[in-house]
Image (cartoon, helix red, strand yellow):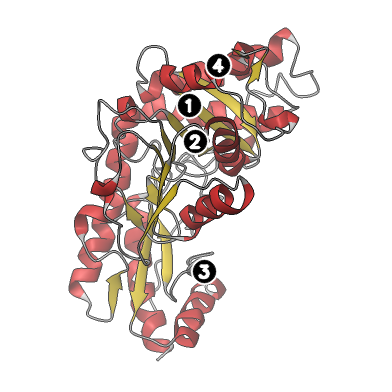
Amino acid sequence: MKPTRKPANPNFSSGPCSKRPGYDLARLDTATLGRSHRSALGKAALARACRDTAELLGLPEGYRVGVVPASDTGAMEMAMWSLLGPRPVDAFAWESFGEGWITDIVKQLKLEAVNRYQAPYGQLPDLGRANPAHDIVFTWNGTTSGVKVPNGDWISAEREGLTLCDATSAVFAMDLPWDKLDVATFSWQKVLGGEGAHGMLVLSPRAVARLESYRPPWPLPKIFRLTKNGELIEGIFQGETINTPSMLCVADYLDALDWVRAIGGVGETIARSNRNLAVLERFVAANDWIDFLAASPEIRSNTSVCLTVDLPESGVKAMARLLEAEGVAYDIGAYRDAPAGLRIWCGASIETEDLEALLPWLDWAYRASR
């Protein structure tokens, strides 16, 4: 029979992701709207976005946080175009975004000393092949595959090269070893349910030293430039953005950060994501028609949870259409480049009871689509 109870919030998209519980647009602090981002008020709001991010994440001393253009993609491109080149690169990929970074490194930057370590969807490449003398480029969590890096043990503490990590669907949901990450990027619209178009760039002192000692041989567009006259542009990490940001989006992000602080900090956002994954793990264990794309629990994402279903691709798509038509779950089809299946966001902004209400509907939609 068709279930009767529906999730109060059916937004399970993997980006942009659901707004935080209790979110109210009318309660945002909109004092900066209509003001210049270079006014004292605007710069203070942007500086707080950087400062509060560093504080809540517990970044090591000397790490810098900046707001940059073009979401996580812009932040990663900025880092790769500004930092790569002096050393060989070990690039690890196991889904579409990691593959995209390899494409940029090889075909756009045209670096020759590149080692590509790749794995199919649902698996990880051999991370142990990372060379401490090389720069390393990887995603922490494969948003389109539901496969994450289990820990940072494979990254050498005595490394000579830099680690560049796309952490967009991991920050605030997974325990990241910040001392092992020289560059980390993320965007507001993932775990915190913020708005799109802005990226966050986290740099270690080692990354700053590279920026100030190395000049790439290729032209750098203005929005990629992090140095001037051989020195880091410190203003970028103090609220003086490269280009004009949306101050409404900034207000939205500050609201999300305030929510993280109010519920107990990043430890609680990680716990919320883990509890949500556990709901789906129990469901998968009880039903033989559904499984995780990431078969090994230690590499299973607790945010972008990717599932396979015992149906042909047309049947899986029919499931997703049924759930959307019923107003039960929106935007949960697998990413276009990934194997056919479902992708359910379990990040911190999702309430566990909404996932629990979704489960009977998954079973109903499966049986209706056979």
Q: Is residue 105 left or right of residue 347?
A: right
Q: Quadrant of residue 311?
A: bottom left
| Residue 97 coordinates in the image, percent (x, y) | 50, 54
Q: Earlier in the sequence, mark 2 or mark 4?
A: 2
Report the residue marked by disc 3.
337
Check disc 2 and report its element: helix, strand or loop. Answer: strand
Residue lying at 55% horizontally and 16% vertically, measured from the top left? 212
Mark 4 or 3: the one toward you: 4
Q: Which residue is mark 1?
A: 202
Against 124, is 42 above or below? above
Q: Quadrant of residue 28?
A: top right
Circle 4 Cα neighbour tier, 10 Å, few/some/many (<14 / 14–19 / ≥20): some
Per the image, the residue denoted by label 2 is 185
Q: Quadrant of the C terminus?
A: bottom left
Quadrant location of the N terminus in the rendered image: bottom left
Proximity of marks 2 and 1: CB atoms separated by less than 8 Å: yes
Distance Cα–Cα, label 2 vs label 3: 22 Å
User: Disc 3 and disc 1: Cα gap in Å?
Assistant: 28 Å
Q: Earlier in the sequence, mark 4 or mark 3?
A: 4
Q: Secondary structure at mark 1?
A: strand
Query: In the figure, is residue 109 to the left or right of 55?
Result: right
In the foreground, 136 or 147:
136
Residue 72 image offset from top left, x and y in percent: 56, 41
Horizontal relation, residue 185 to residue 300: left or right? right
Provide the residue designation for mark 4: 212
